[in-house]
Amino acid sequence: MGIMKLKFNEQGLIPAIIQDYKTGEVLMMAYMNEDALRRTVKTGKVHFYSRSRKKLWLKGETSGHLQLVKEIRFDCDEDALLIKVRQLGGACHTGYRSCFYRKIEGKSVKVVGKKVFEPKDVYAK
């Protein structure tokens, strides 16, 4: 099965869930177009398509917090990806290891994730 058989949406995108290959922790979710997926496969570094900037981006190109591919899977409907990675630094632009660092507990929100860097120190460069 080739990349072309995957089901990209009407905008030419497919959701990609990024997971730590050792712990199983879900780090983030973003979108890929066909070019981003091909570059990811070719380089072994995760690339995404930015819907807001309308361009390709290499995860970690600014921060240095790269995602190194260990395995790429797709679901039974062929319309979502699961990419297992070795995460260098934090996955979240807010400084947390995972974008899923908050938890709803009853009527409140609790921060349960680990902050691993200060965004102002990384993105001010």
Image (cartoon, helix red, strand yellow):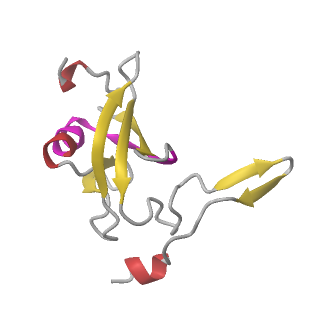
Question: In this view, which residue lies farthest toward the right?
Answer: 107
Q: Position of residue 62 (x, y in %)?
A: 30, 70
Q: Nearer the viewer, residue 6 or 41?
A: 41
Q: Position of residue 115 (x, y in %)?
A: 56, 69
Residue 32 seen anywhere in this rendered image of the structure: yes
Task: Tell me: residue 111, above or below residue 62.
Answer: above
Residue 9 seen anywhere in this rendered image of the structure: no
Q: Nearer the viewer, residue 54 or 103?
A: 103
Q: Residue at x 46, y 65 (%)?
A: 93
Task: Tell me: residue 61, above or below residue 3.
Answer: below
Magenta span includes 28: yes
**Quadrant the C terminus occupies:** bottom left
Left or right? Give the position of 107 relative to 58.
Answer: right
Q: Which residues are magenta?
A: 25-39
Left or right? Give the position of 123 relative to 35.
Answer: right
Q: Position of residue 92 (x, y in %)?
A: 48, 61
Q: Residue at x 51, y 45 (%)?
A: 26
Marks counted in the figure total 0
Q: Position of residue 49 (x, y in %)?
A: 30, 47
**Quadrant the N terminus occupies:** top left
Task: Tell me: residue 86, above or below residue 39.
Answer: below
Q: Residue at x 40, y 45 (%)?
A: 21
Left or right? Give the position of 110 relative to 18.
Answer: right
Quadrant of the image occupied by residue 11: top left
Quadrant of the image occupied by residue 41: top left
Question: In this view, which residue lies farthest toward the front?
Answer: 22
